[in-house]
Amino acid sequence: MHTRAVIFERPGRLVIDQVQLIDPSDCDLVIKVLWSGISTGTERLLWSGDMPTFPGMGYPLVPGYETVGIVEEAPRHLADRVGEIVFVPGSSAYKDVRGLFGGAAEYVIADADKVLAVNPEMGEDSTLMALASTAHHALFHPIINQPILPDLIVGHGILGRLLARLTVALGGEPTVWETDPKRWAGNFDYRICHPTDSDGLTFENIVDVSGDDSIIDKLVAQLKPRGEIVLAGFYGAQLNFTFPPAFMKEARVRIAAEWNESDQSAVSSLIDSDRLSLAGLITHQRATGDAQDAYETAFNDPDCLKMVLNWSGTA
């Protein structure tokens, strides 16, 4: 079986070409992709060649872990899943290219247990399930086994907005820092301001998604004693901080990484109960024939909050 896919042949070089899929197992679903999202974090590093080396890294590769499609084939014991609209967090089912993360293709094969049925009425907004789950993971404290709601979120990009929406959905009242005035526009259920508008204020729980590798000292200055800073962005350079101010406040720093199934389940429950919406966050859409422009826009246009590829051929 073959499929068209986005292939990063090397950093900065993209093609749409045919790749060969492995044969599906008795646990796999064959899914025709409708939309796939472009990540401006992980995929930007793959595009630029700045991604740190880790297992599975290399070129050529198929990117993408924000995929929504329709189940076309399933093993007999899963036949009732045919026709479902599903979210797919990537695929590694390729013979001749690396699947990292493998979701940007016309057809994907994925383990049925990792494929989540979604409400068809959500349309392309369902591609945001991975980012929403990532945001939930940043809020969920692994020691006390429950969310810690931030009173400050740094960054009002796509992940910052999802963090703020989740915090409000769970009963919090966050302040969001954003330095770009263009990202202040809109009606929000939370306060958004420039960092200088918070001079003199302190915060107990801060989540940073700015990606600013010099951010820790700035946040320690506005942290309450024994407060916590959660680093939920991706930082390309080495992180440093000045020890005495952090020592004086007994600051705690936690890193939030990859979401898990419990995060996805929590987000699904909030969506199903109408406490959380993913609507209104996708700003750009392109047909797959315009994939080169789509990736360049997603990575370089500050007005692009979220880009999705439309695999039906129209956008």
Image (cartoon, rainbow, N blue to C red):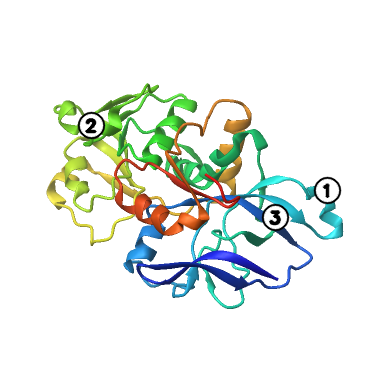
Category of crowding for the residue at label 2, using alpha-carbon neighbours closer than 10 angstroms: few (below 14), some (14–19), many (at least 20): few
Q: Are marks 2 and 3 in contact (CB under 8 Å)?
A: no
Secondary structure beneath dot 1 equals: helix
Residue to which mark 2 is pinned:
181
Residue to which mark 3 is pinned:
113
Task: Please report the residue visible at 75 percent of the width from the left and 68 percent of the height from the top.
Answer: 25
Asked whether residue 119 appears in the rendered view, the answer is: no
Q: Quadrant of residue 272?
A: top right
Q: CA distance from mark 2 to mark 3?
A: 42 Å
| Between 259 and 130, the one nearer to me in the picture | 130
Q: Amino acid at mark 2?
A: Pro
Asked whether residue 29 appears in the rendered view, the answer is: yes
Instruction: Specify which label sits upstream in the sequence, 1 or 3.
Output: 1
Q: Quadrant of residue 124?
A: top right
Q: Are marks 1 and 3 in contact (CB under 8 Å)?
A: no
| Between 28 and 148, the one nearer to me in the picture | 28
Q: CA distance from mark 2 to mark 1?
A: 49 Å
